[in-house]
Amino acid sequence: AAAVMLPEPDGKHLRVHALDFPDSRGSFTEKTAIPIEGTLPGQAFQSGKPTVLNRLDPTEIPPEMYAKAAGEGVNSLCHMPLVSRGRVLGILAVAQRAENAFDANAVEFLSQVAKQVAIAVENALAYGEIADLKDRLAQEKLYLEDEIRGGMDFEGIVGQSSALRHVLSLVETVAPSDSTVLLLGETGTGKELIASAIHDRSRRKNRTLVRLNCAAIPTGLLESELFGHERGAFTGAISQKVGRLELADQGTLFLDEVGDIPIEIQPKLLRALQEREFERLGSTRTKKVDVRLVAATNRDLDKMVEDREFRSDLYYRLNVFPIRIPPLRERPEDIPLLVRYFTQKYGRRMEKQIESIPVTAMKKLSRWHWPGNIRELENFMERSVILTHGSALQVPVGELANNGRTTPAAGTREASERDQILRVLKDTNGRVAGPDGAAARMDIKRTTLISRMKKLGIDPRKVISRHYRFQHLLSFNKLNGLAGSPQVSAVVARLRKGYMKRAQCSRSQSPTPLANGRCSWKASLSRRGLLSCRGCHAKQAMTCKAES
């Protein structure tokens, strides 16, 4: 007789998983559990060495095991550990009715057999683990899809304004079809949420919604990310990669910031949309796909087409069913609902019981036009919840730039936006990008801010230091020694760039007349980048003012 025993998850028993005992009387069956402690199979499993019993002895094995072995007429037992890659997987147990059945040659033969059995057992265990993992992943996928579908219901889109209801009615209209949808709107208006709602109400809802932010991927990698590549297609392509377009087969592909796709990639995308076929980078094999496209942008594609920055044929292919998502300032009646929603959301996350929102704070929040839209409002409410220590929400309304002002009317909206951008640019000394730049302070993308500035005719170079007063101490008798210092470098840089229209020597205000009258500072840049005063050539330290 022979049996394969494998450990139980509790680590205390070995269970029979395979048994070959033709003349068995029923004492041993598959699924029989044998304790590891105090038994010969357990000893072989723990030590990794075979145990041999050539004569049944009640002192060598537990009484229960002795009774079963005697009942079957077994007199010799051999337990071989199944070892693979240094790990004991289980036990190969062999029984004989004859005494002294396992001599040295028999044990050596069984050890060779055990090696082959160990390989088979390891493969079977690996296959079982893979099958269990696949089942678990399938269940998790179904669960997550249910969660996503539940979260993307219209109940998850907060708002009751007529503008939002119009958008949702368009979503209901276009979702059942496979037509391409182009979502237009400012950054932070919830375009990705609308795209998810379209997918959730389409016939492809049981398939994957694949997202790709075209502005977040470097230009050199966007084509690979979208279409995939073969191994060796370019330097660094050490393995094959499946692109987002292929991943979205039979599902929906959401391309956010589609206006940022480089023009050299646009023909390939157009072909994939029209012909439903493409090739991976480095491959000549054409792949067929069935993808429904939802694109989104905050840029003016019409103007980009006129400026030859975006292909007209691709634009017409995308603009099949455009949906304009209104900014938050056009639906102020939704602001109180969003404020309560985000307060509850972050209150639960931070385990805070916030029961009320001050009326005055709510009014001021509703009056502010939120240029960053819902994203800006959400970040502001998260900050408010962080600052709250009681049951009433503590809103830092002083951070709102136009505290107390009402939402601008349509005719003054651009002027209000222009004023806000100018105000932030002044605070950042004209810096647009970077962690301390205007885009970061306004919580919008750099490209979005630049686009708005072009639209409003704002030149950041003209904003810098418009009301700036630059003051420092200069010692003319040590001017050469100060060359390259931060003080001198700052003045030199501003003079060179034209940010300073005139520079004034402090002695120009002196009541003591100079030989040539009152000194008029004349900034002069030498080849070494030094400053000199041609008016008085003063040697003492003086305060030098430079202003726009």
Image (cartoon, rainbow, N blue to C red):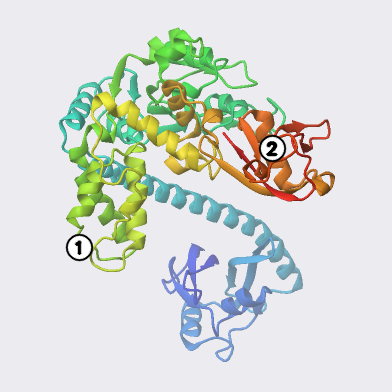
User: Along the horizontal axis of the image, is 281 left or right of 408?
Assistant: right
**Total numbered circles:** 2
Instruction: Establish if 501 lies above or below 488.
Output: above
Packing grade of label 1 (10 A; few <14, some 14-19, many >=20) is few
Tell me what residue is drawn at x 79 percent, y 40 percent.
Answer: 537
Pick whichever, 61 or 260, lies toward us.
260
Q: Identify the residue under disc 2.
A: 519
Q: Secondary structure at mark 1?
A: loop
Residue 17 percent across, percent down from the top left = 48, 63
Rate crowding at label 2 as few (under 14), some (14 to 19) or many (20 or more) other CA atoms within 10 Å: many
Q: Position of residue 428 (x, y in %)?
A: 52, 41
Q: Is residue 254 left or right of residue 86?
A: left
- Whole-percent x, y for residue 173 in the image: 20, 22
Asked whether 69 or 407 is in front, the reply is: 407
Question: Which of disc 2 and disc 1 is earlier in sequence?
Answer: 1
Residue 203 makes an appearance in the image: no
Residue type (three-letter) at the residue carrying disc 2: Cys
* Side of 225 relative to 378 (left or right): right
Residue 67 visible in this rendered orientation of the protein: yes
Kind of residue sitting beneath label 1: Glu
Left or right for 512, reference 385: right
Q: Nearer the viewer, residue 159 or 477?
A: 477
Locate the N terminus by quadrant. Answer: bottom right
Q: State the separation of the CA atoms marked 1 and 2.
A: 67 Å
Q: Nearer the viewer, residue 106 or 258?
A: 258
Name the image quarter holding residue 209.
Answer: top left
Q: Which residue is mark 1?
A: 355
Residues at circles 1 and 2 in contact by the CB criterion of under 8 Å: no
Q: Residue 204 in the image: x percent, y percent?
A: 31, 28
